[in-house]
Structures are given as C-alpha cells and as structure tokens.
Image (cartoon, rainbow, N blue to C red):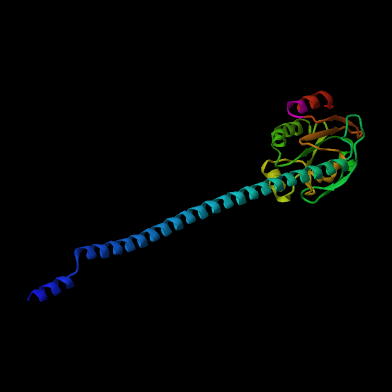
Amino acid sequence: MISEILIHDRLKPKPVKKLEVGMKRLLRFGGTFFLVSAFLLISACSKKEEAAQQQVERKKSDTSASLEKEKGAIKSTQKSFRKRETEMAKRGSKIQKGEKMRDFTARTVGGEEITFSEFQKDKYVLIDFWATWCRPCLREIPHLQEALKKHGDKSNFAILGVSLDKDAERVKNFVEKNKLNYPHLFDGKMWQNEVSMLYGVNAIPFTVLIDPEGKVIAVNLRGPGLTEYLDKHLES
C-alpha cells in the first residue's frame, strides 16, 4: 500500500513542470507574434517609402514635362518672331506722304479683279488696311462710313479696303452685316497680303489717301481726324 502511494506520487506531474511548459509555449507564441508584427510593420514602412518615392518621381516627371512645355513655348515664340522679322524684311518701304501711288492688281473678297490705277483714276481714294480680328480697325468703321457718305458723291471720293484676314467667308459676312459698301481686297495671306507688303504696312489700322493725280497726300488718317481732313482738303 505504501509502495503504491509512492509510485503514484512519482508519476503525478509536478506543478513546476506545468509552469515551465506553459512559459515555453507562451514564449513560442509571443516570438511568433513579435515576428509577424515586425514583418507587418516593415511591410507598411516599405509601402509608405515606395509610395513616397513614386510621388517624388511623379513630381520630377511633372516638373520635367512642364519645363519641356515652357521650352516648346519659348521656341515657338522665337520662331514666330523670326518669321515676322523675315516678313518685315521682304516688305517694301512704308509708303510716305508725297510719294506716287504704288500700282497693283488684286482680287476682291468676291473675286472681282481690280487694277488700282484704273480704280483710282480721276478721284480721291482712301486705301484702308484692316482685318475683322483687329479691334482698333473695327472702331474706325463708323468714321469711314461717315466719310464715304459725306464725300463719296460730291467730292469724287472712294474707299478701297484691304483685308488682312485669313477666312474669306468671315470677311464676306462681316462686310454684308455691317453694310460696308465699298470693295475689299482679299488674298487670305494675312500679314503676307501682297498689297500690304507692297505698301510696307506693318501695323493696322493704316490708311493711305491718294489724290486724282496718283499722289499720296496723307497717311494714317484715323478717327474724327479723317473727316476733318477730308472736309478741309477735298473739293466740294
């Protein structure tokens, strides 16, 4: 009986052993949890770093694209200036008061051919260089209409428009809508318009007044000054 009790006691697990086993399991679980947590933290940091790097790269790319766009705009502007300088170099000298008129043959926006020496013969002619896109030119229209109404018949006075537009239909519609009852030359070449090149025109609006003898008697008459000049100098 005593022997059986002793054997039973020996076989009974000791509380210390259970504690040791529990601690080992806890440590094993804790180590695994720590490793998983560390891995997740490292992964999160790595993703944040990757996202930050991508943002930096995007900013670099955007900055690079913006710089290239600016360079392109500068090159385009420089090209436009060089083109304009070339065009200016090809122009004749700007017509001046006292010169003889410069003859030409050109077509109106409606297709009619006009030789200026024939159109101008025995009358005063105001050549008006203009365009529908030129706001200062449009402000001159009432003064031109007033001058033509006042002096057109009694003073043998005529106006010849020279449009520096590109679109013929736009000019036709504008002329019809605003009742500009005088011919308008048009070739669609804008600043390379042949008549404007011949007369050395580099800015609009610009006008040239030619007398019946074909002599330039005034240039760049504008606003009320146009009618005042005509009132004073044209024969009634």
Q: Which residue lies furthest to the front in this view?
A: 3
| Residue placed most toward the observer, 173 or 37 | 37
- Up the image or down, 87 lies above or below 53; here it is above
Query: Which residue is depicted at the point 72% across and 50% down?
Result: 167
Look at the image and tell me in which quarter the C terminus lies. Answer: top right
**In the displayed structure, would residue 147 be above or below residue 119?**
above
Residue 148: image quadrant is: top right
Can you tell which quarter of the image residue 206 is in?
Answer: top right
Residue 203 in the magenta stretch? The answer is: no
In the rendered structure, the answer to whether residue 145 lies left or right of residue 52 reads: right
Residue 112 as seen in the image, left or right of residue 25: right
Residue with the most extreme top position:
232
User: In this orientation, which residue lies closer to the viewer: 93 or 61?
Assistant: 61
The residue closer to the viewer here, 210 or 188, is: 188
Residue 160, given in percent of the width and then of the height, sits at: 80, 40
The residue under the point 72% across, 44% down is 74
Residue stretch rendered in magenta on the structure = 222-226
Principal secondary structure, stretch drawn in magenta: helix
Give the image location of residue 76, x and y in percent: 74, 47
- Residue placed at 22% from the left, 63% from the top? 16
Give left or right: position of 96 versus 32.
right
Q: Judge whether residue 225 is colored magenta.
A: yes
- Residue 100 pos. (x, y %): 92, 34
- Quarter of the picture holding the N terminus: bottom left
Q: Where is residue 55 in the image (x, y as percent from the top left)?
A: 54, 51
Q: Which quarter of the picture shows residue 192?
A: top right
